[in-house]
Image: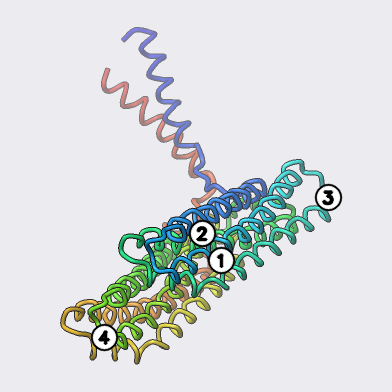
Amino acid sequence: MDKTSIISKIFLAFLVAALICVPVTAHEASVSDVAADIVEDSQILIALCTEIHDQTEYIADDESLDAELCELAESIHLFSHELESVADDVLLHAQKLQTLVNADSGNSAAVGKEIEAVNEHSEKFIAMLGTKHDDIHDLVFNAPESHEEYADATHDAAHAAGDAAKRIMANSKELQGMLASGGAPSSPSQNPGVTAADITAELAEITEESDKLFNSAESILLDTKAIVKDESVDQDIRDLAKTIHLVSHELEDIAKTLQEDSAKLGTLAADPVANKNAMKSTIVTMKESSAEYSAKLGSQHDNIHQLVKVAPESREDNADGVHDACHAAKKGADNLVGHLNSLDSALDAPASGNPGSSMPAPGFGVLAAICGLFGTVAYIGRRE
């Protein structure tokens, strides 16, 4: 074996060792990242206002449609201008906030003022959007098939805008907390007090159950919509389905929040010891959301069973689908709370020396590197 070949293979051995030593660290959002997220969602807010504006215009300007429907679309269309004006204010203050944060001026009073302004306008946006909730749903129910896609797009944009405004407020709150604690994300703790395997398992279950709750809500929404839109069905039955349908939108919104909080838990779990309090706080919030979901679902228990009894044969499958999704959601909400309680207990678990503990023993990477180095050299020697 020539000298060049020996040197190349020794270099390869050192490369393997170096790769073994490279620590794998989870990304933690910085103050700048959170500020950037607020700006991005503010821009999304404006885009969604434009979407509501454009989609309602397609209905409002069509003279072939019923005059009342056109007027309803026009009222939402005009309202979108007011919404966009508030969204512009949110973006203005979000950009000022980002500039202050990135400049690291240390002017906490100015930063605090901009955070308050962002929250104030976001809260106003959500409240304003809520005043058009019924009108938007009426538009969806009454739009003819030829204009159904415009009404549905208006509805989807309105819900997405509400979600974006809520994210802005949540990120503003998070940013406030980060700045109060010095603005730097905590470094990973070396305390192996939390069993990572248990936490990972519970997080997977929490994510799955949150997704199931959303899917159940969506299933109820679609099946009731099918009954409501069927003009061959008795009006009383359609009205009953509409009542359940409107609640399904609220269930879907709660489930979306649970999915977002579930994802947040996953991020925090990168360092469960340092983020223990934040995780516990999120668990409490999710349990409250789950309780709200169950309460709203329970409020429609009698209506859902009545729908199953009175639905005509042509819509029997839809009514049964609503009923089955309701029971699946009830079970899912209970399961979610159970896994949230288990995660809460896992965070309080004593130190564990099991392989599932959250951090490897100090020096393990170096030992592995040395073993890797000698193993590779020995392997090369035997090959030659």
Of the two numbered discs 3 and 2 in the rendering, the one whose residue sits closer to the viewer? 3
Of the two numbered discs 3 and 2 on the same chain, state the one appearing first in sequence. 3
Residue beneath the point at 43% across and 56% down: 58
- Residue type at tag 1: Met
Percent coordinates x, y for residue 283 in the rendering: 53, 71
Residue tagged 4: 234
Of the two numbered discs 4 and 3 on the same chain, state the one appearing first in sequence. 3
Q: Are marks 2 and 1 in contact (CB under 8 Å)?
A: yes
Of the two numbered discs 1 and 3 in the rendering, the one whose residue sits closer to the viewer? 3
Residue beneath the point at 66% across and 56% down: 85
Residue tagged 3: 107
Q: Residues within 10 Å of mark 4 (few under 14, many from 20)?
A: some
Q: Who is closer to the viewer here, 23 or 286? A: 286
Which mark, by number, is residue 269?
A: 2
Report whether residue 354 is seen. Answer: no
Residue beneath the point at 50% across and 77% down: 287
Of the two numbered discs 2 and 4 on the same chain, state the one appearing first in sequence. 4
Spatial separation of the CA atoms under disc 3 and disc 2: 32 Å
